[in-house]
Image (tube, rainbow, N blue to C red):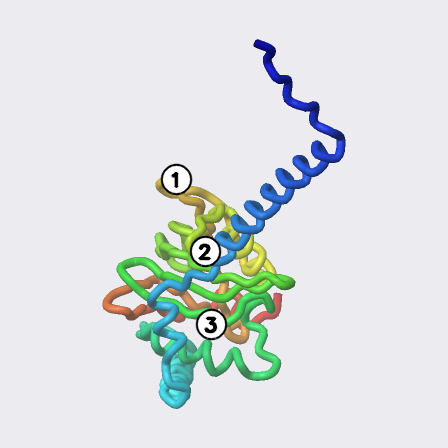
Amino acid sequence: MTQSIPPPITRRKMFRLIAYILTGIFLIFLLILYLLYLSAQRVPEFYKKSLGVDPEVQQVRNREMLHKVGDLNNAVQRVGEPWRAVFTAEDVNAYFAVELAKEGANFFPKEIIEPRLMFSDRQVDLACQVMRGTFSGTLHLSLGLTLPEPNRLVIRVKKAKLGKLPISKEIPVKFLENAFKEKSYRVQQGTEAGDPTITVLFDIEYDNKRSVLLDGITFQDGRVQISGTTEQSPNNGIDR
């Protein structure tokens, strides 16, 4: 009994087989990209809720926020008197929603859209839309903020995600470092419990006559309280 031998694969069939394989790989690649894109669009619950606040409510809360900032500005200028201010996440988010929409507002880089935050115990959760070219996604950062000494703010990056996808914590650290340096603040990088940190050294003065000392920052029940004192500047009004 003779055994039949399969006909040899022709060159055309070989090219067709390779084309099918490459097409399959390409479709799988597109599917992975699509799934990654969907993951990048996942929105934290607090962010979704804050974006849904009624615009009229935001206008009212923004006016309240501006009033608080005005009171704080007046208090900070009084030498020798301790000052403090309390802000809710709703206050700050309303400020972001209303003031950042105004023409000429440049608090954040143009790639950052609709930032919102949430306060919890010694932590700030910040979320925003990030747009670069045709790509967009939801960035979510969990930041720890502490003041080990006056005017020395330590920012610890606990979590960094683009949608559901974890990203390197060094990315927001570098972004924060550049942002503070552009405002002429001194910054230092470090680590805490394995997380990267950036330490910001403030030097705040009014008219070269008054030095502002920020010596307290606490988070509780969706609020942040900052406190400090204002002292006579050692410059005594003499320009440096």
Amino acid under label 3? Arg
Q: Which mark is residue 60?
A: none
Dot 3 alpha-carbon crowd within 10 angstroms: few under 14, some 14 to 19, many 20 or more:
many
Residue at left offset 32%, top offset 74%: 88
Residue at left offset 47%, top offset 61%: 41
Dot 2 alpha-carbon crowd within 10 angstroms: few under 14, some 14 to 19, many 20 or more:
some
Residue ID for mark 2: 39
Would you say 52 lies left or right of 31 here?
Answer: left
Label 2 close to label 3 by CB (< 8 Å)? no
Amino acid under label 2? Ser
Residue at left offset 42%, top offset 61%: 42
> How far across and how far down the image is residue 208, in percent?
54, 71
- Real-space CA distance between mark 2 and mark 1, rounded to the nearest whole angstrom: 26 Å
Label 1 close to label 3 by CB (< 8 Å)? no
Residue ID for mark 3: 210
Question: Earlier along the polypeptide chain: callout 1 or callout 3?
Answer: 1
Q: Which mark is residue 194?
A: 1
The residue nearer to you, when weighing 163 against 88, is 163
Which element type, helix, strand or loop, lies under badge 3?
A: strand
Amino acid under label 1? Gly
Q: Nearer the viewer, mark 2 or mark 1?
A: 2
**For residue 146, which quarter of the picture?**
bottom left
User: Do we see residue 198 in this rendering?
Assistant: yes
User: Do we see residue 83 in this rendering?
Assistant: no
Question: Earlier along the polypeptide chain: callout 2 or callout 3?
Answer: 2
Q: Of all residues shown, which one is farthest toward the top?
A: 1
> How far across and how far down the image is residue 228, in percent?
35, 68
Q: Nearer the viewer, mark 1 or mark 3?
A: 1
Q: Of all residues shown, which one is farthest toward the right?
A: 11
The residue nearer to you, when weighing 9 against 153, is 9
Would you say 41 lies left or right of 135 here?
Answer: left
